[in-house]
Amino acid sequence: MNFSNFGQKFTNKSGILQLMDDLGQAMSGDSDMLMLGGGNPGHIPEVQRIFRERMQRILADNNSFEKMIGNYDPPQGDLAFTTALADLLRELFDWDIHPENIALTLGSQSSFFTLFKLFSGEYSDGKKKKILFPLVPEYIGYSDLGLTNNAFIAQRPSIEHIDDHTFKYHIDFDALEITDEIGAICVSRPTNPTGNVLTDKEIQHLMSLSKQHQIPLIIDNAYGLPFPNIIFSEVESVWNDNTILCMSLSKLGLPGTRTGIVIANPKVIEAITGSNAVFNLATSGLGPQLTLDLVKSGDIISLSKQLIKPYYQQKAEQAINHLSASLDGYDYHLHKAEGALFLWLWLRNLPINSNELYNRIKDRGVLVVSGHYFFPGLNGDWQHTRECIRITYSQEDDTVKRGLEIIAEEVKRAYDVV
Amino acid sequence: MNFSNFGQKFTNKSGILQLMDDLGQAMSGDSDMLMLGGGNPGHIPEVQRIFRERMQRILADNNSFEKMIGNYDPPQGDLAFTTALADLLRELFDWDIHPENIALTLGSQSSFFTLFKLFSGEYSDGKKKKILFPLVPEYIGYSDLGLTNNAFIAQRPSIEHIDDHTFKYHIDFDALEITDEIGAICVSRPTNPTGNVLTDKEIQHLMSLSKQHQIPLIIDNAYGLPFPNIIFSEVESVWNDNTILCMSLSKLGLPGTRTGIVIANPKVIEAITGSNAVFNLATSGLGPQLTLDLVKSGDIISLSKQLIKPYYQQKAEQAINHLSASLDGYDYHLHKAEGALFLWLWLRNLPINSNELYNRIKDRGVLVVSGHYFFPGLNGDWQHTRECIRITYSQEDDTVKRGLEIIAEEVKRAYDVV
């Protein structure tokens, strides 16, 4: 049995698939691995209670449960949910958003598959275009979505040293070139893996550049405002006709429901809807049904602010304190934790590369992710890409603490050898 | 904002997307349309009660509900479910099936997207290959999955006239050519849209041809054995290392959970798993959780046999009786109803084409699907493709009856004009 070139990509277990295997096995439950590698949101009891009560109400309400499981949702997603969400966004931000500006998908990864296909590859004039990441590190999950090898182009960031052990990436606008081979600009905010939150000024600059070049600005808002609000700095939420804002119910605590949300102009929504119909037939009603009341009442905003954000902010602070205490005296740099679930640890001039460090840490029973996976589309050699690791702090405090201790030991051992 | 060629395909509302719009609007609930066009399974109260009770047990069982909604499932799908299913299939059919032979997907449509990509398009030797449908009519949902325009090749069937008004399609093996441009053979059994069930002899012949040419035989078993068992003829279930058997929980009554199942050799399962990881990140745990007990106990087999199959078989017989009585004296031919949810009505020498008939019926408030959509990959002109419509009989008896009366009126009006 022979596979197409596409198929071979998925049968040769290399790179990202090997990594996913590692993560999958660690999550399978039989493993004793300390999981500081994945992106599973924490289980927040107060939030879980809300979803449990909602499911009980669905079961109690006539045949709501039967409709939820027994009917195909339309490919644009549940209309009651998209209507309620449009109402909420209009009220919160005064954006001109209506149900025709919103499509649901089977998860944010699926949204990005479609969006990258919509704005890269061959155009009607015969030109081939790419997605521009104006700042890397960027989300590992984008890497293989391009289907072709040349779907992305990326640019190195500038680095601001905030103090001896804290830094922040910025977009290097002076070097940023938007040629006619760019089909769309894409950023995540907060950024997975670094926790970076692009400043309002950076976002305004990107919006004006994308408008000027008549290409969309795609913002991956999976951790952002107004929900789940895992964002620790004060920034503005933006949207306009030329912006494609992607959200998700996963980090609200519902990764099992596979619910992605795309907010864009009606033409883009139409394309997402068509793509859903052709590739997935239908979206799932579970996520929309479990959260409809919360969106209608606006409680989704208060629970994000009062339960979800503080939960992660406290975990971030604890993790930073642990790691800083353990690595005192070493040339380590943590990206300023502005949001999401991760610490991004830069080990300047580490004598071994980050993948070797990943393996040593894994041998000690802790999973992190080597930073070199997070530079999709970057050309040219840059030592920095081999000096970083991503550490998830969303799991139980004790797991995170034990994991960080082992990480610190291995980091110090690597530095000390020289 | 400009779209890639891929994007343009999904923003020009033509053909299948227009049709999906029609179907979507009719299902939205505000419409008075009689829905004899879609593929939504019927709501069978006894079956729904089983799922409702299972959800209540999940809620009662410690933190099972919290895990179901709050954790990412692995990209191969829930291991407890695939293990239980492998056990069941080994016991039922004596197939050599283990968990590494099973992957879950976000619905059968998603399975076919991946499978068609795995076995069509460019190969490492530079050759471009296609998926062969040895018999059309075939499932409308395959049509746009190829991404390119030349992903499929199909062959006309031979037609057996069983009686004056009943016929059955067969594979025309004499004409069937399997060149080296074929990457895989694909059939659905029972077939959507016709209700055809390929005979055991036909399937054996396809299995031997595919083995001989070292290409996989993909069988879309969404309506078949051992569940949901919407199959009214006595046939054997088959699987071997060279066969890729696709199943689904949708027609069991769970389309909202988006659960597809692929049963194949471990190499194919690895590729499906990788594709899930890259394009969807994770599968959904809802469907596996709702049916795990049923698979473990084997009750999924008995409920399919005792509740689901008779429900549809009775509806099929009623629909055939209604339509036959109404069309008596006309040159109509119904495909032998051997399974699935549809009547396939062939109106020989109808003075108008099937799309015009679709529109006239739609104007009268009834939705069916014009047959011309169901010939993906067929080259050359064949009048038969414009003489058929697909009628869904899965909805409430009264809806189906009223719909069939209007369809018969419009058919007779079209014949009578000449």
Image (tube, coloured by chain):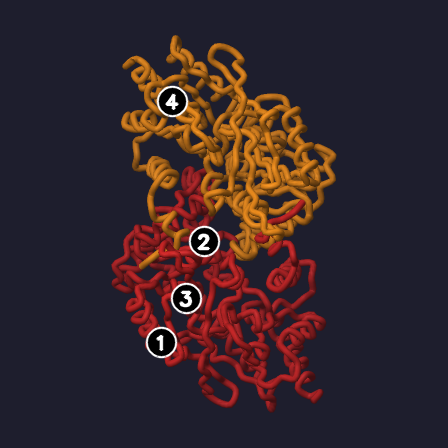
Chain colours: A red, B orange
Q: Quadrant of residue A319?
A: bottom right
Horizontal side of residue A263 vs B66, given as left or right: left
- Residue B398 bears which disc, if any? 4
Check disc 4 and give the amino acid type.
Asp
Q: Position of residue A261 (x, y in %)?
A: 40, 56
Q: Nearer the viewer, residue B281 or B17?
A: B17
Q: Name the residue that disc number 1 marks.
A: A202
Q: Split into 4 quadrants, where in the image is the C terminus of chain A? A: bottom right
Q: Residue furthest top?
A: B329
Check disc 2 and give the amino acid type.
Thr
Check disc 3 and give the amino acid type.
Cys
Check contact, mark 2 vs mark 4: CB within 8 A: no
- Residue A186 bears which disc, if any? 3
Circle 1 SS class: helix
Q: Residue at x 69, y 58 (%)?
A: A30
Circle 4 SS class: helix
Q: Chain of mark 4?
A: B
Q: What distance separates the C-alpha of mark 1 from that of mark 2?
A: 29 Å
Q: Quadrant of residue B208?
A: top right
**From what the image shows, is residue B76 above or below residue B368?**
below
Q: What distance separates the C-alpha of mark 4 from that of mark 1?
A: 60 Å
Q: Residue at x 55, y 32 (%)?
A: B223
**Badge 1 and badge 3 both on one subunit:** yes
Q: Name the residue that disc number 2 marks.
A: A259
Task: Indicate which label's residue lies in the foreground, 1 or 2.
Answer: 1
Circle 3 SS class: strand
Q: Nearer the viewer, residue B167 or B397?
A: B167
